[in-house]
Amino acid sequence: MSLPTLTLRGFVTVLMLVALALVPQLVELTGNAFLIDLATRCVILAIAAVSLNLILGYGRMISFGHAAYLGIGAYAVGIPVYYEIYNGYLHILVAMAVSAVFALATGLVCLRTRGVNFIMITMAFAQMVFFTFVSMEEYGGDDGLVIEVRSEFSRFINLEDATVLYYVCFASLLVVLYLVKRIVNSRFGMVIRGTRGNELRMQSLGFDTFRYKLICYVIAGTICGFAGALLGNFTNFISPEMMDWTRSGELIFMVVLGGAGSLFGPVLGVSVFLLLEEFLSGLWLYWQLVFGIFLILVVLFANGGIDSWLSGRSRRSHDS
Amino acid sequence: MTAKALLSIVNLHKSFGGVAATKQVSLDIVKGEIHAIIGPNGAGKTTLVSQLAGVLLPDSGRILFQGNDITRMPAHRRPHLGIARSFQITSIILDMTVLENVLLAVQAKAGHSYRFWANSGDDASLVEPAMASLEQVGLQNQAMQMAGPLSHGEHRQLEMAMVLATNPVLILLDEPTAGMGQEDSTRMVRTLQALKGSRTIILVEHDMNTVFTLADRITVLVEGQVIATADPDAIRSNPRVRQAYLGEELDSIPSEPHAEDSMTKSPPAC
Ligand SMILES: Nc1ncnc2c1ncn2[C@@H]1O[C@H](COP(=O)(O)OP(=O)(O)OP(=O)(O)O)[C@@H](O)[C@H]1O
Ligand SMILES: [Mg+2]
C-alpha cells in the first residue's frame, strides 16, 4: 500500500486498472465506439483467463477445455431468453450451477490422469459439449442463435446500454481478481500450490490432493461459466464456435503470455493478445502467420510471461 | 505381536515382477525406540518404508498400527494417525519458501484445509509451530528464502522440519543423512538424539556410526529378508550379520559409540 514499495509490476497493474476504468470516458472523448466493444471483450476474457490461471497457473492442471464453460455460460443466457425468460439473476445462477456440475463430473475423471492425458481428456470433454450444442437444431445447431434481449436485472442495471454493460463486466473482473487473490493465499490455495510443486510430498503430509484439486477445478469452471454468461450478453449471439478447442487454446496462450501463476498476469495477457490481434489484422492480410510465430516465441521464451518480466525488472532496481 | 508394539509388521510380502523386494517380513516396533533398519543397497529398505507409509501396497501380509490394521489405508490418511516420513531422495516443494514448506506440514496436522479466505501466512497458529520446527533443525534463519536454491544439507534439514511439524507418533526416516557433509550430519544426529524417547523412529541408514550412536534396536535386511533383529551389541557380534553384510565395517565401530569427531562417512547410497 505504501508508495515507496510500488514496484514496476504494481505500477503497471494500477495503470491498467485505471485505464480500464476510464474506457467509457475515453470513448466519449474520441468518439470511437468500437473501443468499448474491444474493452468489454477484453474484460470478459480476462475473467475467463483469471479463472483458468487458478487451475493452470497455481495448480498446473493444464486444461485444454476451458472454453466449454464460456459456451455453457452463454447458452445459459441464450436458451432461457429463447423461451422469453429474461431474469438475469436466474441466467447467472444457471450458468454457474451447470458449469459447477460439469466441472465436478468431468473433473472426477480428468483429474485421475496427468500430463498429456489430462490435456487430451479435458479437450475431449469440451468437444463433447461442442457437439452436443451442434446437434441441438432447436437452438440453431451449428449456426448458433441470436439473443434478442439481454439479461434483465433492475431498472438501474440496463445491459442494453454499452457503458453499463462494460462497467458490470469490469466490476465483475475486480471481484473475481479479489476472490482469486484470497483463495491463492488461503490454506486451500497453499495446498493447491504445494500440490503443483510436489504432489507425492503433499500426500505424505496427509493431504488428499485429489479432492483439493477437484474443488479448485470446480471453482475455476464456475467462475468461467459466469464469464460465459457475460459473453453471451455482450455478443448477443451464441454458437458452438464459442467453445471450440481453438478457443480453449487461445485462453491458454493468454494466460501463458501474461504469466501463469501470477494474479494479474492473465489480465495483461488478454490485453496484449487482443490488441495485437486488432493491430495486426488491420495491418496485413496474412497477419495470422505473424501472430502464430509470435505465439510460438512466447511459449518458447516467455518463462513466466509479461508478469515475470515486470517483476524481474523491479527486483533489479531494488537491488541497486 | 507383543503387547507394547506400536507398529507390527506381519508376514509382509512385496515383489516387483518376479523379484521379491520384501520377503515375509515380520517385525515389531516398540513405542519410544529408535529402530534402525540396515542392509546393503537393494536390500528392500525403501520398499519396506514405502509400504509402511502407504505409497506401495504389499502383495500379502499385514501392518498394524496401535492395533489397527492399516495395510490398505491410503497414504494421505496415515499422517492423521501420527505417521510421518522423510524421503531418501529429498522431497520438498522447491518453488515455495522454507517457511511455506513447513507451514503446509503444520496445516496438514491442523485438520482440513478447506479454508478459502483467511491468509495462511498471517495465521499465528500455523506460523509459530512452523518456526519452532525450523529452530529444531537449525533452519530458522533461512525461513524466508526459497527452498529450491538451498544446499543439499539444508534440504535434508527442511525435510526433517516438515516431518517434525506434523508432530508425529511414528517417524519413518529413509537415510536422513544421505549425501550430507560432516557438519550437517552431526547436526542431524543431534536433532534425532533430542527426539529419543519422545518419538518412535524407524531409521533407515547406511552410516554405521549414526546407526550405532542412535539405535536402541537394529534390524538387518538382506535381499528382502530379515536376518536379525536385536540390540546393537548383539548385532555387532552376530555371525550371520557379519557374514552377510557388515564384515569389516563393524570392526571400525567403537564399542562406546558417540564420539562425533570419530564419525566417518560412507559414500551416500542411492
Ligand atoms: N518401483 C520398483 N519397481 C521395480 N523394482 C523395484 C522398485 N522399487 C524397488 N525395486 C527393486 O526392489 C529392490 C529393493 O529396492 P529398495 O529401493 O527397497 O532397496 P534399498 O534397500 O532401499 O536400497 P538402497 O540402500 O540403495 O536405498 C531392488 O532390487 C530394486 O531394484
Ligand atoms: Mg533405499
Image (cartoon, coloured by chain):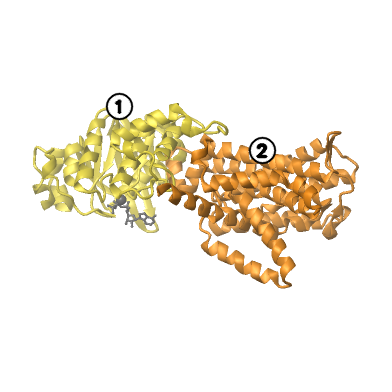
Chain colours: A orange, B yellow
Image quadrant assignment for residue A188: top right
In-image side of A232 versus A293 (left or right) = right
Chain ID for label 1? B
Image quadrant assignment for residue B37: top left
> What secondary structure is found at the residue carrying circle 2?
helix
In-image side of B166 versus B138 (left or right) = right
- Return the residue at label 2: A175
Nearest-to-viewer mark from 2 and 1 = 2
| Residue B27 visible, this angle | yes
Whole-Å distance between the Cαs marked 2 and 1? 59 Å
> What secondary structure is found at the residue carrying circle 1?
loop
Instruction: Count neighbours of disc 2 (C-alpha within 10 A) and say few if under 14, some if 14 to 19, many if 20 or more.
Output: few
Image location (x, y in percent) of residue A10 = 55, 44
Q: Amino acid at mark 1?
A: Ala
- Return the residue at label 1: B3
Q: In the current view of this chain or complex, which residue is farthest to the bottom?
A: A286
Q: Are marks 2 and 1 in contact (CB under 8 Å)?
A: no
Q: Is residue A117 above or below residue B264?
A: below
Chain ID for label 2? A
Image location (x, y in percent) of residue B185 = 22, 44
Q: Nearer the viewer, residue B54 or A136?
A: A136
| Residue A101 visible, this angle | no
Q: Name the residue at 72% across, 59% down.
A: A244
Image location (x, y in percent) of residue A160 = 86, 44
Instruction: Confirm whether circles 2 and 1 share one chain.
Output: no
Image location (x, y in percent) of residue A258 = 59, 54
Q: Amino acid at mark 2?
A: Val
Q: Is mark 2 within 8 Å of ligand 1?
A: no
In-image side of B197 versus A176 (left or right) = left
Q: Name the residue at 72% across, 48% down.
A: A44
Q: Nearer the viewer, residue B197 or B154?
A: B154
Instruction: Count neighbours of disc 1 (C-alpha within 10 A) and say few if under 14, some if 14 to 19, many if 20 or more.
Output: few
